[in-house]
């Protein structure tokens, strides 16, 4: 199963970008043996529409054009489900093992959140926790959790609950 991270906003040079690349690189290597690769990332520019609802809508339209029609979608949303790392790993494995979709896209909105069109397309809304995270840090947490899920599925000692 191919994995895609589609996000509004670009990571600038620096520690967040380096950490994200580090975890995605490790996940990519481990994912080959687990049927969870390749992993690709698509960055979209933030909308310049003046009002927040308009920005969410414009960004949702742009995001939807980047999602392959046959991919399952998980959106990151503060109102989404709170999953443990083990439950997240189980979710990845279940989606991989269900032959219904050749890929899985994780979608992160911009500072104003996700537009309803993306939320409607998603089969699951996932929260990284109740605290507000900067966009770059949310991407790092997602990348690390993807890697952690793969280590759980592989029985690797990285995850020690």
Image (cartoon, rainbow, N blue to C red):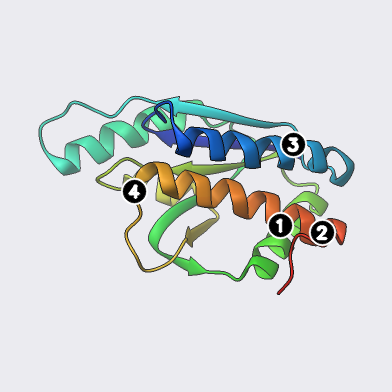
Q: For the residues marked 2 and 4, what is the alpha-carbon distance in whole angstroms?
A: 28 Å
Tag 1's secondary structure?
Answer: helix
Q: Residue at x 32, y 59 (%)?
A: 132
On residue 153, the disc is 2
The disc placed on residue 28 is: 3
Q: Disc 3 on helix, strand or loop?
A: helix
* Quadrant (top left/top right/bottom left/bottom right) for the C terminus: bottom right
- Horizontal arrangement in the rendering, residue 79 relative to residue 25 (left or right): left
Q: Are marks 2 and 1 in contact (CB under 8 Å)?
A: yes
Name the one closer to the observer, 104 or 151: 151
Q: Quadrant location of residue 37?
A: top right
* Residue 60 x %, y %: 35, 37
The residue that appears at 43% across and 47% down in the rendered structure is: 137
Q: Quadrant of the N terminus?
A: top right
- Judged left or right of residue 61, residue 24 is right
Residue 12 quadrant: top left
Q: Secondary structure at mark 2?
A: helix
Residue 7 in percent (x, y) is at 44, 36
Query: x%, y% of residue 110?
Result: 32, 40
Q: Tell me: residue 64, above or below residue 30.
A: above
* Residue at mark 1: 149
Q: CA distance from mark 2 to mark 1?
A: 6 Å
Q: Are marks 3 and 1 in contact (CB under 8 Å)?
A: no
Comes first in the chain, label 3 or label 4? 3
Q: CA distance from mark 4 to mark 1?
A: 22 Å
**Among numbered discs 2 and 3, the one appearing first in the sequence:** 3
């Amino acid at each position: 199963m191919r994995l895609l991270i589609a996000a509004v906003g670009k990571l600038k040079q620096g520690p967040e970008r380096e950490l994200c690349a580090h975890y995605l690189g490790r996940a990519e290597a481990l994912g080959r043996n687990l049927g969870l690769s390749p992993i690709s990332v698509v960055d979209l520019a933030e909308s310049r529409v003046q009002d927040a609802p308009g920005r969410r809508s414009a960004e949702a339209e742009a995001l939807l054009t980047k999602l392959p029609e046959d991919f399952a979608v998980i959106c990151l949303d503060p109102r989404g489900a709170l999953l443990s790392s083990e439950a997240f790993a189980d979710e990845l494995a279940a989606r991989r093992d269900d032959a219904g979709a050749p890929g899985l896209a994780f979608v992160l909105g911009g500072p104003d959140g996700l537009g309803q069109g993306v939320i409607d397309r998603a089969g699951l809304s996932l929260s990284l926790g109740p605290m507000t995270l900067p966009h770059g840090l949310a991407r790092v947490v997602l990348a690390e959790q993807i890697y952690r899920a793969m280590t759980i599925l592989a029985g690797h000692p990285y995850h020690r609950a």
